[in-house]
Image (spheres, rainbow, N blue to C red):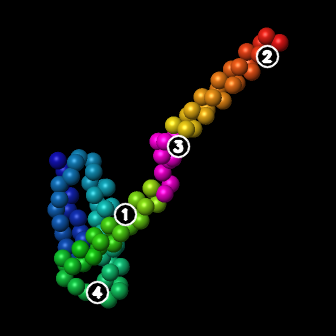
Amino acid sequence: MAQVTLRINGFAYTVGCGDGEESHLQQMAAEVDQRIDSIKALGSQSGEARLLVLAALLLADELHDLRLASAAAAPPAPAAGAALAARLGRLAERAEELAHTLDRG
């Protein structure tokens, strides 16, 4: 297991991660640090714990919005998929009937 030291809001945090995941973890820490910077830019100079909680809430809000967008763009429900499959099956049968009729002709 690898260990990486992350800097968030000027503080160092050493955390463990899977080998090869260090860069990804550093990118995620940069995302958190960016949210903290945006909170501080609004004039909030609260304690470290409060800044981390507010950053976590911002990230959770973004995740919530992404999940809503993803659900809206989700594929049709299984019932709709079953109806589509049945219709395609009927169309395939009809195409086979036509092909068979043309072969006889």
Q: Which residue is tagged 1?
A: 63
**Residue 79 lies in the magenta stretch:** yes
Label 3 vs label 4: CA separation?
Answer: 49 Å
Q: Quadrant of the C terminus?
A: top right
In the picture provided, is 102 more to the left or to the right than 45? right
Question: Would you place residue 62 above or below residue 36 in this image?
Answer: above
**Is disc 3 in contact with disc 4, using a CB cutoff of under 8 Å?**
no
The residue lying toward the viewer, choosing from 47 and 91, is 91
Q: Which residue is tagged 4?
A: 44
Label 3 amino acid? Ala
Which residue is rendered at x = 57% and y = 32% of the image?
86
Precedes in sequence: disc 4 or disc 1: 4
Label 3 vs label 2: CA separation?
Answer: 33 Å
Callout 3: SS: helix
Give the image location of residue 46, x and y in percent.
22, 85
Q: Which residue is tagged 3?
A: 80
Precedes in sequence: disc 2 or disc 4: 4
**Residue 40 lies in the magenta stretch:** no
Callout 1: SS: helix
Which residue is rendered at x = 70% and y = 24% of the image?
95
Query: Of circles 3 and 4, which is in front?
Result: 3
Which residue is rendered at x = 33% and y = 61% of the image?
27
In the picture provided, is 34 more to the left or to the right than 89? left
* Circle 3 crowding by C-alpha within 10 Å: few under 14, some 14–19, many from 20: few
Query: Of circles 2 and 4, which is in front?
Result: 2
Label 2 amino acid? Leu
Label 2 vs label 4: CA separation?
Answer: 78 Å
Query: Of circles 2 and 1, which is in front?
Result: 2
